[in-house]
Amino acid sequence: MRKVIILLFILSIAGEVFSQATDYLKSDFHQERRAAVREKMPANSVAVFFSNPVRNRANDVEYIYHQDPNFYYLTGHKEPHSILLIFKDKQQVESSSYDEIIFVRVRDALKELYNGSRLGKEGARSKLAINAAFEGPDFLKYNLNFTKFDKVLFYDFNNDVRDFEEKGDLYELIASFKQKVNYDQSTSLNPEPVKNNLDMQMLDQIMNELRGIKEPEELQLIRKAVNISAAGQAEVMRAMKPGMSETEIQGIHEFIFKKYRAEYEGYPSIVGAGHNGCVLHYIDNYKPDIEDGELILMDLGAEYHGYTADVTRTIPVNGKFTIEQKLIYDLVYEAQEAAWKICKPGTKFTDLYAATADVINNGLVELGLYKSSDPKDIVNADTGRNRYYPHGCCHHIGLDVHDKGEYDVLEENMVITIEPGIYISKDSPAPQKWWDIPVRIEDDFLITKDGCELLSDMAPRTSDEIEALMKETSPFEGIVLPDIDGK
Ligand code: GLY
Ligand code: MN
Ligand code: MN
């Protein structure tokens, strides 16, 4: 009996470890995605994808590496200095054939001692399930005749790739590829481009079509990322007090992300109190003492196994909206509800925006902040945008926060944000009582067969629900750290 209990215990631990390991995308997911690309490629073509470059932060320190989302989608490979080729048709080499080939980093004991193990070509074969797997330097010698293809599909280069002076690094892979396809003859810099088979547009269209519609495995990871992000918002609502800093609030969100084992933030976190909330992509997050009476706008997304959420909440720092803050908040909420109501397959992205703008513009006319809903009374001549609602309302999320996808009509299994906002800065012509009221409410929605599902419902959305949650106690209240300045 004792043995059985011990065994059950071991199995439950193993089950736990196993269940953690299994929520990564599996190699057959990526294999199917490569097949889906191949299916959409034109006759007699090859598609070429490069891994993201390693970017330098300062001196000998690099930024945390993040794989190119297309490359990750198609391989699951998280390492730099790699190139993937997908062929429409099988390539025959003597007695064997292949329709995809990858070149990855050479293994290096010393570098792996510092930076962790590399997959190498054997690992690429077994873990990525790409049988034709070789090392970077092999690509330099790879004798493929690119002129035989009707089309060579790839993304044009950003020219921000450093030379690591390593055999087969990304710098060399790109240089070698350019030489193999006669790239320099084809760029816009050349006044008389030669007629060629290079296509730097079609691949993006293919990736938009594929990545915009999420597979079940992707939806599972997106749900997790969204739940984590919404849980972070709810926890901050409990913890928020005047006198805290923007940095500290960002820290609580990101602590929750890590506590739930999200690896990263999907984009730089935005935590702006008072006037700072009026800067749409404010990322300084350094106001030391958030003031009683201010609103704080928090736009954060956890990235879980590559997939990111994008959730914004705006809350009163002291737990209670002022009359003006509540009027603006409820108007933004109403705008979001209006778009949610029509969010289903067949609706256009432009319809979603129109639904939010309609509510906001008319509401601001009623509040006397716009003279009328005529564009001349709404558009700020300096920016050319709607003065108080200057951004769009919706975008795909996924491996990118502004994810690849088509932006015409909603389809089942798209995942999008609806994020109306009103930002009344102290520099605006509004009467003073409205100054520095920034409100954005951003939620993530899965388009279903005949409607849509709100994914980010773990964070309250209405002004009343927010005020109620802010009265609850927080586990962060009891944290007192030693004084380090007077030590
Ligand atoms: N977090 C950026 C955006 O909402 O689009
Ligand atoms: Mn967004
Ligand atoms: Mn956002």
Image (spheres, rainbow, N blue to C red):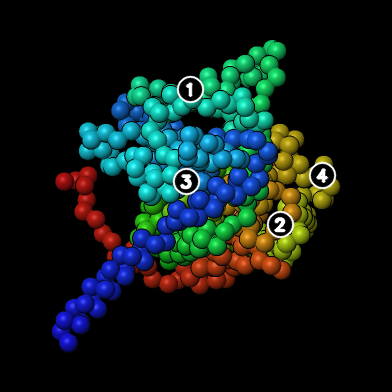
Q: Position of residue 100 (x, y in %)?
A: 51, 41
Identified at 62% across, 27% down, the residue is: 148
| Earlier residue among tags 2 and 3 | 3
From this view, report whether residue 246 is shown above or below residue 444: above
Q: Residues within 10 Å of mark 4 (few under 14, many from 20)?
A: few
Residue type (three-letter) at the residue carrying disc 2: Leu
Q: Is mark 1 within 8 Å of ligand 1?
A: no
Residue type (three-letter) at the residue carrying disc 3: Thr
Residue type (three-letter) at the residue carrying disc 1: Ser
Q: Which residue is mark 1?
A: 176
Q: At numbered mark 2, what does the secondary structure look like: helix, strand or loop?
A: loop
Q: At numbered mark 3, what does the secondary structure look like: helix, strand or loop?
A: helix
| Earlier residue among tags 1 and 4 | 1
Q: CA distance from mark 3 to mark 4?
A: 48 Å
From this view, report whether residue 62 is shown above or below residue 317: above
| Horizontal side of residue 370 vs 3, given as left or right | right
Identified at 70% across, 13% down, the residue is: 192
Along the viewing direction, whichever of 476 and 90 lies nearer the viewer: 90
Q: CA distance from mark 1 to mark 3?
A: 22 Å
Q: Which residue is mark 4?
A: 375
Q: At numbered mark 1, what does the secondary structure look like: helix, strand or loop?
A: helix
Seen as rendered, the residue at the extreme top is 191
